[in-house]
Amino acid sequence: MPGARIEIWQCDVNGKYLHPGDNRLVAYDQGFQGFGHNITDDAGNYAFRTIKPTKYPGRTPHIHVKVFDGNRELLTTQFYVAGNPDNARDNLYRRMSKADAEAVSMTFTKGPKGPETIVNIVV
């Protein structure tokens, strides 16, 4: 889908969100912005460079994702780390079917600049 806006946000390596709702007394990683967006190219491709998701209190590691077509929100979901043992205890992850969980799970490989993954979003 060309021209779609993809947004991601996640907690930092300390499990802290850059959000006024996260008022826990945890140091925030000042080198991490916690949010990003990209516009898909003519072929619908997009890319992000971020940290591998870390654990947030009460949740398994994940990255939040939204997809927009102009001002219209098409999708809100989360990407999870495939095989993470905390997935089995995560309330949202557990509610998904096996197929749905696999569709939003990231499998990491060693890339030239560190761990990397590919996630295809289908709207």
Image (tube, rainbow, N blue to C red):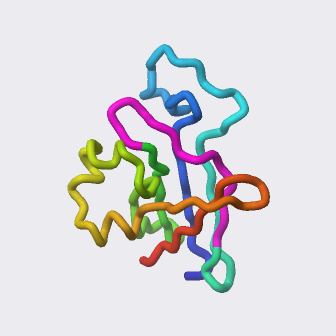
In which quadrant is the C terminus drawn?
bottom left
Quadrant assignment, res 44:
bottom right
Residue 42 position, x and y percent, is 67, 84
Residue 58 horizontal side relative to residue 95, left or right: right
Camera-side residue of 27 and 40: 27
Q: In this picture, which residue range is highlighted in magenta? A: 46-60
Query: Which residue lies at the image location 24% right of the left edge and 61% below the top edge?
Result: 96
In which quadrant is the N terminus drawn?
bottom right
Task: Say above or below: 31 vs 85.
Answer: above
Camera-side residue of 29 and 98: 98
Quadrant assignment, res 111:
bottom right
Query: Which residue lies at the image location 53% right of the left edge and 47% below the top edge?
Result: 9
Query: Which residue lies at the image location 48% right of the left edge and 73% below the top edge?
Result: 121
Quadrant assignment, res 99:
bottom left
Residue 87 position, x and y percent, is 33, 48
Query: Could you tell me how many numbered marks the image carries?
Result: 0
Residue 55 within the magenta-colored segment of the rendering? yes
